[in-house]
Amino acid sequence: MWSLRAWRRQRILAKHPVSPAEWQAVLQKLPILDGLNETEQLRLRERAVLFLHHKHLSPLPGVELDAHARLLLAVQAELPLLHLADLNWYQGFHEIVLYPDDFISPQRHRDPSGVVHEWEGEHSGEAWLQGPVILAWPGVQASGQWDGYNLVIHELAHKLDMLNGDANGLPPPHSNMAVQAWAKAMQSAFDQMNAELDANPDAETAIDPYAAEDPAEFFAVTSEYFFSAPDLLNQAFPAVYAQLALFYRQDPLARLQQLHANSPDYQVRADNNGFATKG
């Protein structure tokens, strides 16, 4: 049966082809794609092209955004959706604003006693409900390694979280998922991290301590680790890893383990610059 949507999709893909050389350059730059099979790579490449067609990237002065850089960002944006049905998961926004560096953003928080706190915070990314995604370009450039940091995935995880309204750490579950199991796994790990940091604010937590800020940040940070340090996440919080595997319908840990099994000299190429502050 003829479909207007499918026709439009094929027309976009035909108009914006990605050459084998361009795709190879992407694979070279993003180790977290290692181990994807040909079918997965084709789907990811096509979805990245469609992402760039539907979303507007707005670089501010100081950000050099060529075709290769645009494709790198789009591929990382679409990696979490690789095995999800094409259901417009990134709805509710059409623009990604790229800052040349971290930026100051006014913050507002109401504590459990009802007191409102306001302050200026430095961030490398933000995602607004029914608004744009903001990314600091150095954070985007540092993403894509097996090191637990991925600014693109972090901020777009917030957008998935916001599909139900305000970000609260619970994206729309699939029919084979139990909300109670998700809540138990996430809350237990979140409470464990907070207890550890309450006892010692300088504790070396198993994952980025920013995850302990609130449930929304916990989901965003663990989503980063799920795709870029699945071994560390699974070791620290196996129940959280299992729930994310159900949601994203992927198993990056198995892919990483297979890479090591097939290539004994496979090196995890990690960026040693540490963790940036996320939003």
Image (cartoon, rainbow, N blue to C red):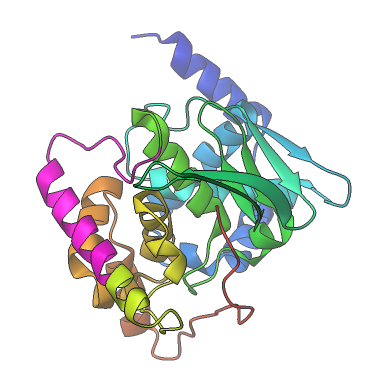
42 is within the stretch colored magenta:
no
Residue found farthest to the bottom: 265
Q: Is residue 14 left or right of residue 136?
A: left
Looking at the picture, does residue 232 appear above or below residue 77? below
**x and y percent of residue 177 in the render?**
14, 42
Of 276 and 62, the residue lying toward us: 276
Looking at the picture, does residue 29 appear above or below residue 180? below
**x and y percent of residue 148 in the render?**
46, 70
Number of labels in the image equals 0
Tell me what residue is drawn at x 31 percent, y 77 percent.
Answer: 196
173 is within the stretch colored magenta:
yes
Q: Is residue 20 left or right of residue 9?
A: right
Q: Is residue 76 left or right of residue 199?
A: right
Res 16 → quadrant: top right
Res 256 → quadrant: bottom left
Res 38 → quadrant: bottom left
**x and y percent of residue 43 in the render?**
44, 42
Name the quarter where the N terminus is drawn: top left
Of 188 and 240, the residue lying toward us: 188
Q: Which residues are magenta?
A: 167-192
Tell me what residue is drawn at x 61 percent, y 33 percent.
Answer: 132
Looking at the picture, does residue 92 appear above or below residue 258? above
Looking at the picture, does residue 12 appear above or below residue 62? above
Tell me what residue is drawn at x 84 percent, y 51 percent.
Answer: 64
**x and y percent of residue 188 in the render?**
19, 63
Tell me what residue is drawn at x 48 percent, y 73 percent.
Answer: 146
Examine the rendering and report whether any part of residue 86 can be seen: no
Examine the rendering and report whether any part of residue 69 can be seen: yes
